[in-house]
Image (spheres, rainbow, N blue to C red):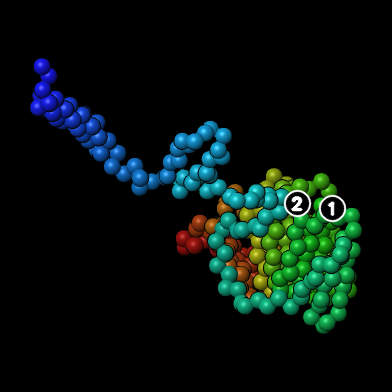
């Protein structure tokens, strides 16, 4: 006959065996991945497959921009090191964008308007003594010496880099450089023939443009241009001063003197 004491003993043995089994299954999980909750949080849908899953956190090493970056007009940055000590530059002109128009306010309190009807504005900025606008079919510039917005035409250009100076601004495409001169209120076009833009700088009435093949120095009031072939050398750094501009290419230095308006070649190994 099956006794109650025998049943109790049997139940104890069963419970002990169950406890040992649970412990043996739980112990490996403690050592399998001790840091599993220190990283990303994982979500398990225990209700249904149609519930929207929470957004996963991106990997910290990956940069995911929140909005698309517009690539057709960008700010240009010099490849050679610019050692120029620029003074504090105060913007003395600004503009207001109205309905299908831009109105510039000059330092003498006069106003110069431009109608943008039929144009898509891609870039606009004021700096120093000038303002420029880039649309899908025109370049526009105005300065404190202007009586109207000066228009420069562009043909089939899609991408631009823009650099602003105190007295001049540069709009560069893959094929041409468009320089706005605030002294003359004029756009100058410089073609790029098997070369690319490396640097642009403007200090007072002088502009420096460095390409992969040459140096161009422009006197803004007279619009005179002076060039120096780089002879397959590469400019590593440059510096604009009140009386001269230095261009360093390894052991060679090209100095442009304002007084003589000419380049002088100096060998730094002597």
Residue 104 drawn above or below residue 54: below
With 229 as the anchor, is 116 left or right in this view? right
Residue beneath the point at 71% across and 50% down: 72
The residue lying toward the viewer, choosing from 34 and 266, is 34
Residue that carries the numbered disc 2 in the rendered image: 176
* Picture quadrant where residue 37 is located: top left
What residue occupies the far bottom of the structure in this picture?
108
Where residue 85 appears, x then y in whole percent?
Answer: 57, 73
The answer to whether any part of residue 259 appears in the image is: no
Q: Where is 190 relative to 23, above or below?
A: below
Task: Using the image as rendered, state which of residue 126 and residue 97 is in the foreground.
Answer: 97
Of the two numbered discs 1 and 2 on the same chain, state the one appearing first in sequence.
Answer: 1
Element at label 1: loop
The alpha-carbon separation of the residues under discs 1 and 2 comes to: 15 Å
Q: Position of residue 165 (x, y in %)?
A: 69, 68
Picture layout, residue 204 above or below residue 236: below
Q: Which mark is residue 137?
A: 1
For disc 2, the neighbor class at 10 Å (few under 14, some 14 to 19, many from 20) is some
């Amino acid at each position: 006959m099956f006794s109650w004491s025998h049943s109790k003993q049997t139940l104890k043995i069963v419970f002990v065996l169950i406890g040992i089994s649970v412990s043996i299954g739980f112990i490996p999980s403690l050592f399998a991945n001790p840091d599993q909750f220190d990283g990303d949080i994982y979500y398990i849908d225990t209700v249904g497959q149609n519930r929207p899953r929470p957004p996963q956190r991106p990997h910290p090493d990956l940069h995911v921009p929140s909005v698309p970056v517009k690539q057709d007009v960008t700010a240009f940055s010099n490849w050679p090191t610019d050692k120029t000590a620029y003074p504090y530059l105060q913007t003395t002109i600004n503009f207001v964008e109205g309905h299908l128009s831009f109105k510039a306010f000059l330092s003498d309190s006069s106003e110069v308007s431009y109608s943008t009807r039929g144009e898509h504005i891609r870039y606009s900025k004021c700096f120093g003594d000038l303002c420029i606008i880039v649309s899908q079919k025109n370049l526009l510039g105005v300065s404190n010496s202007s009586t109207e917005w000066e228009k420069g035409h562009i043909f089939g250009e899609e991408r631009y880099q823009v650099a602003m100076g105190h007295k001049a601004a540069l709009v560069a495409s893959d094929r041409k450089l468009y320089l706005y001169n605030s002294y003359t209120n004029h756009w100058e076009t410089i073609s790029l023939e098997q070369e690319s833009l490396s640097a642009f700088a403007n200090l007072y009435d002088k502009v420096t443009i460095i390409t992969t093949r040459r140096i161009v120095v422009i006197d803004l009031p007279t619009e005179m241009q002076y060039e120096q072939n780089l002879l397959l050398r590469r400019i590593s750094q440059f510096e604009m001063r009140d009386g001269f501009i230095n261009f360093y290419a390894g052991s060679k230095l090209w100095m442009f003197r304002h007084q003589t308006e000419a380049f002088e070649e100096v060998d730094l190994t002597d």
